[in-house]
Image (cartoon, grey):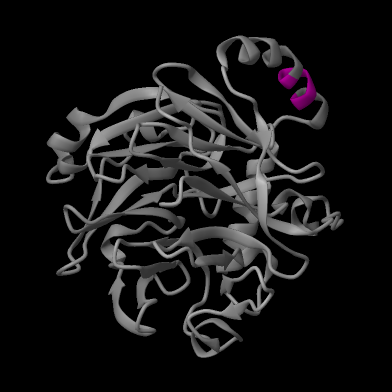
Amino acid sequence: MKKLIVLTFLSSVLIMCKSPNDKKNVQSEESATQTEKTNYEIKTAETVFSSHDIRPGNLAVTTNGRIFVTMNPLVSPTTKVFEINKDGKNVAYPNAEYSTGENSNLKAVIGIRADSKDNLWLLDMGTKQFVVWDTKNEKLVKTIAIPEAVVKPASFLQDFIIDEKHNRVIIADMTQGDLKSAPEPAFIVINTENGEAKRMAQNHPSMMPETEGGFALNPIAVDPNFNYVYFGALNGRTIYRVAASSFVDEETLTNGIEKFGDKSFSDGIEVDANENVYVTTIEKTEIGVYNKNDGFKTLATLPEGQSWPDGLYVANDGYVYGTIDQLNRTAALNNGEDVSTGPYLVVKTKLLKQR
């Protein structure tokens, strides 16, 4: 059932994206404007991992540079999470018991992040819980259940952030996972110390799609100092933000939401310490960036022939990392014909320098 929900969700997302010819037209029309506004060379993102077998969905990078990726349930992976290595020794993570086979502990994982202690947080939408794993000592820290009271029948528990300053995890629940219900997007806010959870700001205008029939709240990010939470609708062209301290009650939260800037339709966003917001531009197969000086523009193109930039992750090495998984080319999303042309990639590009 979880696989069906993910398949249906992503199939419909593709309908919302422009055709290849439309993309070319948009790109040519915008190229002159972007050249005028951009004072740096737009480069192709650097490939740091390439595989025909491992198809990364989302990723996390620890402070010491270890890279972990989830395998989207769409591709029916035998192993749900990998640690990837340049030497090709890619291993199931945290181990085969947790990640590999029908009887594995993890069932359907897309969301993944690392905290400042290098604990890996895995959001398993199959079991509705977080699995927190200590990557330094290789042991389970804890699990945190997501109570049934804060989810909806069509909840889609994918993207989330860890707010270490306020001891919270915040899930961007887009809903619409079954395509039978109207969107009921909301933040699911969970106290990481006692597990208390609440559903907040449901159906707030900032979470709703900006196109008829589109998809709601999906990408979400928090700045490195845990001051602001940034978010937007998948089928939306607006970045919103709210103070991280606002998640105390409904009135404080909803009154604090403000428009921050522009973006493209996007599956993921990240933000750095200089308020640069990085965006996976699924319409044009690029990584974009927004800041108040230059607006929204292309930061990096992706390797030729690739499609569907998915997750992003700002690391402490001066780069933003991204996954490219070609989900739009699978048989389930392409009228029954698989035209995937691996390899599937993890790429990186330098963070935008502060002007």
User: Residue 33 in the image: x percent, y percent?
Assistant: 63, 10
Q: Nearer the viewer, residue 299 or 105?
A: 299
Left or right placement of residue 333 versus residue 312 in this view: right
Left or right placement of residue 63 versus residue 309 in this view: left
* Vertical position of residue 312 compared to residue 30: above or below: below
| Residue 24 in view (yes/no) | yes
Left or right placement of residue 191 versus residue 235 in this view: left
User: Residue 287 in the image: x percent, y percent?
Assistant: 59, 37
Magenta span covers which residues?
23-27
Residue at x-position 65% and y-position 68%: 86
Q: How would you classify the magenta stretch by its main secondary structure?
A: helix
The quadrant of the image that shows the C terminus is top left
Residue at x-position 34% and y-position 23%: 259
Asked whether 60 falls inside the magenta stretch, the response is no
The quadrant of the image that shows the N terminus is bottom right
Residue at x-position 77% and y-position 23%: 22
